Image: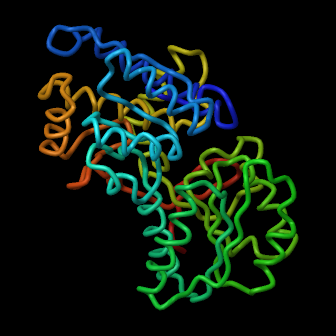
Amino acid sequence: MILPLTGPVGFLGEAERNAILMAEQEINNRGGIHSRQVDAIIEDSKSSAKDGLSAFHKLKAQGVKLFLVSMTAVAKTVSPIADREQLLQVALSADPFIAEEGKYTFRTYYGLDLEIRKMVDHIQSLGGKRVAALYINTPEVFNAVTKTLPNALEKIGAELIITEPFSFTTKDVRSLVAKIASKKPNWVIVEDYGSIYPNIIKEASALGIKNTLIGGIGFLGIPPDQRVLAGGIVFVAPKAAIERTKEYDGFIGRYKSKYGKEPPVPIDAIHAYDSFNIIMAGCKKGGDRPVEVRKALLEQKIFEGAIGKIILDENGKADFETGLGIYKNGELRPWVKQ
């Protein structure tokens, strides 16, 4: 397991590690895989591709053949090596194309291609042809905004009129929001991982365009004390998270019971938990041989997880059911068209 335990997204890595260890314990309590105990060996990518690659080589030298890798940048670095040496990589990445880039790379994480598709369907249902995008400039979001989004909008006769990227360290988003407002868009797609959303919403409110915002899965990561500020903005996320299904809440309850608190970004922890279980499902049929595990996963295709039904396509890319959510008085609710 290669996780960002430290660095800019270390808060995600901690929750991913906890979720994986929880899945490991549950499997071992049930007798393991073919009566063998499962051992999740975890290394820190330090939130960087370079250190992630070093962690990969360290694990490979120990004889590890099956990898669960968090972060798109790390997974993309590992992918060509995994292909060349026939090592299986399951990527916790939202990148729309990562599973298509490597035969031995699966994407079992929520994909931004699914998110964009739902956003564009929402735009089509409400009308409006001029769309802007304000986004965190990571590899997966860049691909979604610059490749997936324009193609999806073109299909409904809409256009992407302006895009403005920002980084994890961006503090002042006023000028970016002002540039977008000056183009008078009907809708503004905003992609972030949660921490910068509140500043964006404040500036959008000041400039009178809050009601044009459409958010993504990062809305689930908005700090609880900031969710009232996000009230009224429709966003896309996994349907299970919006509707708080029995399976979703069951995972959250077990996590809290084990660690004394909920994961800071539950959806990320859930994907790590489900992805580890998917790898183990492949091991039940394929043992620890990557070629056979890959074959087993593609043959099974459908998995039931805490996030709901996970369906793998022929490239190993997961499909999930998405939904539209909204915060009302700080509480998450499914969005219903009035």
Asked whether 30 or 111 is in front, the reply is 111
> Residue sitting at 20 percent across and 31 percent down?
282
> Would you identify the image quadrant in which residue 97 lies?
bottom left
Q: Where is the N terminus found, in terms of image quarters?
A: top left
In the visual, does 173 lie left or right of 335?
Answer: right
Number of numbered tags placed on the structure image: 0
The answer to whether 261 is drawn above or below residue 274 in the figure is: above
In the visual, does 3 lie left or right of 250?
Answer: right
Asked whether 2 or 312 is in front, the reply is 2
In the visual, does 85 lie left or right of 71?
Answer: left
Asked whether 156 or 103 is in front, the reply is 103
Residue 166 on image: x %, y %: 73, 60
Residue 263 on image: x %, y %: 58, 29
> Would you identify the image quadrant in which residue 146 lies?
bottom right
Q: Where is the C terminus found, in terms of image quarters?
A: bottom right
In the visual, does 331 lie left or right of 101?
Answer: right
> Residue sitting at 84 percent across and 65 percent down?
203
Residue 200 on image: x %, y %: 78, 61
The answer to whether 151 is drawn above or below residue 5 in the figure is: below
Residue 88 on image: x %, y %: 29, 35
The answer to whether 107 is drawn above or below residue 29 in the figure is: below
| Colour approach in the figure | rainbow
